[in-house]
Image: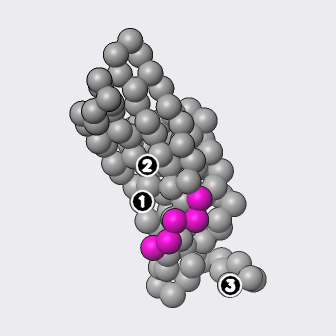
Amino acid sequence: MKVEKILETRLSDADRIFNYTYRLIKGQYEGIVSYGIEAEMNEVKDGQVVDIERDGINVISNNKAKVEKLLNILADNKVSPIHFIDVLGEYIDEYAGDFDIVPAEL
């Protein structure tokens, strides 16, 4: 797996900072280039990381533009890894059919 793109964002409240990192990852699925997403949240309190949450799906689509769009949805809305699948689940189900159509550049 190779990280193709990273988006970072931050939320804060009175005493905590939540750093969100979203990664577009590139890999292979049955010999076809595939793209997925990893989401990570670090909760920082008093300068120390007190919690880390992580989730991801390695194989979403072979269409990079579609997966980049999902990456932007996550970052724009500061989606926690805990809710990652809730937000992207329907898209991921829909995009599974992309592997039936291999883009010409592959």
Label placed on residue 57? 1
Q: Residue furthest front?
A: 47
Q: Residues within 10 Å of mark 1 (few under 14, many from 20)?
A: some
- Mark 3 residue type: Leu
* CA distance separating discs 1 and 3: 21 Å
- Looking at the image, is mark 3 or mark 2 earlier in the sequence? 2
Label placed on residue 106? 3
Q: Residue 25's x, y, as percent?
A: 51, 65
Position of 44 compared to 95: left or right?
A: left
Task: Give the SS element for disc 2.
Answer: strand
Quarter location, residue 17: top left
Looking at the figure, which quarter contains the N terminus? bottom left
Q: Residues within 10 Å of mark 2 (few under 14, many from 20)?
A: many
**As displayed, is residue 2 above or below residue 52?**
below
Q: How is the image coloured?
A: one colour
**As displayed, is residue 48 above or below residue 89?**
above
Q: Is residue 18 visible?
A: yes
- Mark 1 residue type: Ile
- Mark 2 residue type: Ala
Residue located beneath label 2 in the image: 39
Q: Is residue 2 magenta?
A: yes
Q: Magenta segment, which residues?
A: 1-5
Task: Give the SS element for disc 3.
Answer: loop
Q: Residue furthest top?
A: 14
Position of 49 compared to 71: left or right?
A: left
Q: Residue 103's x, y, as percent?
A: 71, 78
- Looking at the image, is mark 2 or mark 1 earlier in the sequence? 2
Q: Residue 13's x, y, as percent?
A: 41, 16
